[in-house]
Image (cartoon, grey):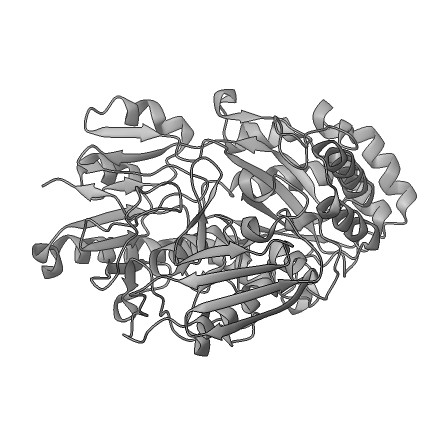
Amino acid sequence: MFQLMRGRCAFAAKLVLSVVALSTVLTSPVLAAGKTITAVMHSDLRVLDPIYTSAYISRDHGYMIFDTLIATDSNFKIQPQMADWKISDDKLTYTFTLRDGLKWHDGAPVTAEDCVASLKRWAAVDGMGQKLMDFTASIEATDAKTITLKLKEPYGLVLDSIGKPSSRVAFMMPKRLAETPPDKPIPEQIGSGPFKFVASEFQPGVKSIYVKNTDYVPRKEPASWTAGGKVVKVDRVEWITMPDAQTALQSGDIDFMENPAIEMLPTIEADKGLKTEILNKFGFQTGARMNFLLPPFDNVKVRRAALLAVKQKDVLDALIGDPKYYKTCAAVFICDTPFATDLGGETLAKGGDIAAAKKALAESGYDGTPVVLMAPGDVLTLKAQPIVVAQQLREAGFKVDLQATDSQTVVSRRASQKSPKEGGWNMFITNWVSADVVNPISNVAVGGQGKKGGWFGWAEDAKVEQLKDAFVRATSAEDQKKIAVEIQKEVYDQVLYVPLGQYQGPSAWRKSISGVIDGPATPVFWNMDKSE
């Protein structure tokens, strides 16, 4: 009851702040000075460091103010962004050369030393970055504009790792910020990207403000996904948190809404002043992660019982509702891809097995320890899953403590290794852009590094790490496929992760907005324009 009352009070406070924030936006004299796009994103922004957390709202913030050495275009090709590159004949040396005119937002020039420090910080916590560093002999600045990466042995995912478009992106930061330990957030938001962050106007959970970086020199190529020319065509972008964004969109008080509710789409689509489109054509995977350090999920038999209890369709019906926008799928590496298989996830594909779950739990030694499941209520695409999964676990015999919170609290709290009584947790549910989990190296949920570099939950599994090494050394697609199947088998055997299904979600915006770019890391706000 206390959690419920606290949640209601928090919502009421947020409602008041949102109304105040919106009225401020609509009367701000800054609007008279130029074009402003006002957007409601999928989540509040509270954690600003996109390396400290893998939360997508922090990634989206990162793309506003930071830039990348290289990037991925809509043909899945890696393209130059801040730098061009050359590869030695023996495939052991990669040389990146910074393009002219790069400056940080504080006016200082971007140097190779900045970029080396940034790459090292990113690689310490990102799954693909960690694996890249396993194969790296050295990475250093050989002059002010040159980054030289030398490998111990040839590694085919160097460019794909540094140029990947989503989750923990290899964003470049000034050296003084990049030397911040990755388990601590950076103290300033200084990048070299197309927008500048207005720290003086930032209200966590209420609004985030960005202005055009007039010193930014975009590339000449057309914008494509996260590559090409990041041409800013407006003066200001405002991310606003508000409880009834759809009404504000239809009335013209906001311009862009990242995640309208599926059940409200017919109303939006009937409005001649609005446009809807699925920007991320590859969609999302939603899934549950357990904490391997604490009871009850430190016991693999208990984890297996939980897996048996899960019914994907129930989760997806509550999350999305319309089968047009979702599919049940037991493939850890996404259905309809080269590494797709149901192996190990048969009960997920068939709709769960409560009877088997009850039997497995009874035989596991489970002692009734409550499962603390964090339940963010402020993000449309994360509200339903914890409620449904909690009920499924209860049906199997688990005691579940469903703790209502907001998404940014989950993002912060999931980093804690303390007991639930001290602010820790037993399970959380998250969503992944499909592009982030499409292979065993990019999918951090299948890692087995434990406390040393492992993703939240800290699974320790030497076998899966050995298989991942074999995957990156495989010389044929057929061999990679075989190894990916073995990895998925291990994932389900040890229950490293529980996929809950795949879905798509359209965004909506007023037709006065043009130049909206699609891709796996959307929305981005360069190339967008607004007619008067």
Is 251 left or right of 500, judged from the image as shown? Answer: left
- Taking the image as drawn, is residue 50 in sight? no
Give percent across and percent down for residue 527.
26, 44
- Taking the image as drawn, is residue 225 in sight? yes
Is 184 left or right of 441, judged from the image as shown? Answer: left
Closer-to-camera residue (247/279) = 279
Is 488 left or right of 230, judged from the image as shown? Answer: right
Residue projecting furthest to the front: 89
Q: Residue at x 68, y 53 (%)?
A: 154
- Number of marks in picture: 0
Q: Residue at x 81, y 35 (%)?
A: 357
Closer-to-camera residue (240/279) = 279
Q: Residue at x 72, y 28 (%)?
A: 341
Closer-to-camera residue (343/219) = 219
**Does residue 391 sit above or below 178 in this rendering?**
above
Q: Quadrant of the N terminus?
A: bottom right
Give percent across and percent down for residue 244.
31, 42
Give percent across and percent down for residue 173.
42, 68
Q: Residue at x 8, y 58 (%)?
A: 33
Q: Quadrant of the C terminus?
A: top left
**Does residue 393 sit above or below 268 in this rendering?**
below
